[in-house]
Amino acid sequence: MTAFILVAGAHTGGWVWRQVAAGLRDSGARAYEVTLTGMDGGGGAAEPGVDLQTHIEELVRLIDRIEGQDVVLVGHCYGIHPVRGAADRRPGRISRIVHVDVGVPEDGDPALKLVPDQTDRERVLSLARENGAGTLPAPTVQEWQRWGSVAGLPDDALARLTEQAVPQPLPTLTQPLRLSGAVAEVPTTGVLCTANGSSIAVVEAMVGLGDPAFQALADPRVTFFELETGHWPMLSAPRELVNVLLRAAAGKGHRVAAVREQPTHLRPFLMDVEERPRERTGRVDLHLPDADGPRPAVVFVHGGPVPAGARPTPRDWPAFVGYAQYAANLGAVGVTVDHRLHELTAYGRAADDIAEAIELVRADPRVDGERVALWFVSAGGLLAADWLAAPPSWLRCVAASYPILAPLPGWGLAGGRFRPAAAVRGAGRLPIVLTRVGLERPEIAVTVEEFVSAAADCGAALEVIDVPLGHHGFETVDPTDASRDAVRRAVRSVLGHLRVGTD
């Protein structure tokens, strides 16, 4: 008989698992919904000495009391930290760890690393400096969205989540997780909640980038499931979660294949383009046309996050090289840039990198600094917001291909800076060329439609080029005549706004 130990996330206790635990018991399994020390209410005062180690030891004692070997540890959000800590202590007793909409913390990682919003992280650190043994106040009903998507949560469930939430002891968030490495041998399952921005497609893309840090996700002992709900599936989709947990315990689920063939982002560009000279300065590559005098430039901005260890880096990916060389063949300077969007918290740093690269490009004597277009791709679309909100005179066009145009749930980008769907209201008559794919992931397609609607409301100069049967990254995934036509139309439209071919 499988025994499931259900460990809740920050500010919550075993009560969030009530329906899931009942469903597991109805199936014949045992279920232990855990309320960790200090998480059972009792007002805002912190219980002395409660930290991550306290919670790890608590789970170890529970594991030792359970008879049999088939123990499945289930962690949601913060709960995955004590879960992995306990499994590292008792690897022989654990048959599987299930990560419910949460990543894989490693040795030395504090739970604070899971907090999606940088502002919230800084607030926690500030509180810890002032009173290291204090607590983080429970979120208000409006603040839960900042910790993860509330999609699928009925109003009464969200109200209950708010009413029963408790302050979180700060040391549980700031103390680093210490692992011996034994936990790496325990089979794992990830439950990915698509409304919170995670999916099997995202995992496969990260593995495909080639960074060694993600190759463990292709281990045959690692499986994945998707749930079409937000960050609290135990409250929004308890029946579905019960089914997933039972299947996970049986070793079922999707397995991500190790990269044995060429990953999609490294496949050839869909068009043959005559090679032009290419010069590299720092993080910037210039693809130069065969032309006299300063020429307009198109700066291509990649998405991400792209792990720092990924090789080759984006400016050497065939799609970006292909676009830049195509622009150079048509008389413009094509520019590719490696910016440092290595994690979701680095959008500010990436924006600074792009601004620095643009200044370098505009200062080059071979570039007409008064005629520049910016072309944003995928998650790089959020970086368009600064330029749409207050376009400088030299910016003649903004383009975007299969972009993300509003932060996805769970990305933690609080505030309004990286929200092109809102920033477009400041674009005036700046030409915008949007390449939209018909087979886009639903969570991304929603942001595109929000942007298109906002652009229509404010009368923005938006041109939409549709690729009805195109996927995200269609330039290397869908080498069809329709895809090639879309690329030609988009590039020529952007160059037309730069007056390339008319001067």
Image (cartoon, rainbow, N blue to C red):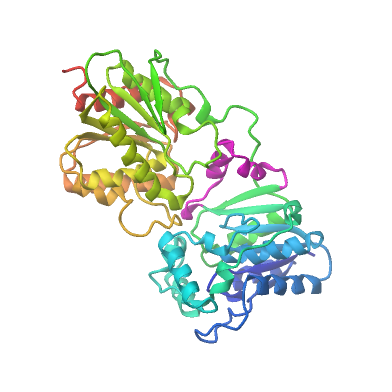
Magenta-span inclusion, residue 185:
no
Q: In this view, which residue lies farthest toward the right?
A: 68
Q: Residue at x 80, y 71 (%)?
A: 64
Residue 354 in percent (x, y) is at 34, 40
Tell me if I can see residue 54 in this picture. yes
Q: Residue at x 52, y 25 (%)?
A: 267
Left/right placement of residue 58 relative to residue 8 reads right
In what quadrant of the picture does the N terminus appear? bottom right
Report how many numbered discs are placed on residues in the image: 0
Q: For the stretch drawn in magenta, what is the main secondary structure?
A: helix
Residue 465 in percent (x, y) is at 30, 31
Give the magenta part as a residue range: 194-221
Q: Residue at x 57, y 65 (%)?
A: 78
Of residues 222 and 173, which is closer to you in this image? Answer: 173
Of residues 360 and 388, which is closer to you in this image? Answer: 360
Residue 438: quarter of image: top left
Of residues 75 and 68, which is closer to you in this image? Answer: 75
Left/right placement of residue 487 relative to residue 89 reads left
Position above or below: 25 against 190? below
Residue 122 in percent (x, y) is at 44, 65
Residue 207: quarter of image: top right
Position above or below: 124 against 311? below
Residue 259 in percent (x, y) is at 63, 33
Magenta-span inclusion, residue 201:
yes
In what quadrant of the picture does the C terminus appear? top left
Position above or below: 463 against 52? above
Left/right placement of residue 245 relative to residue 479 reads right
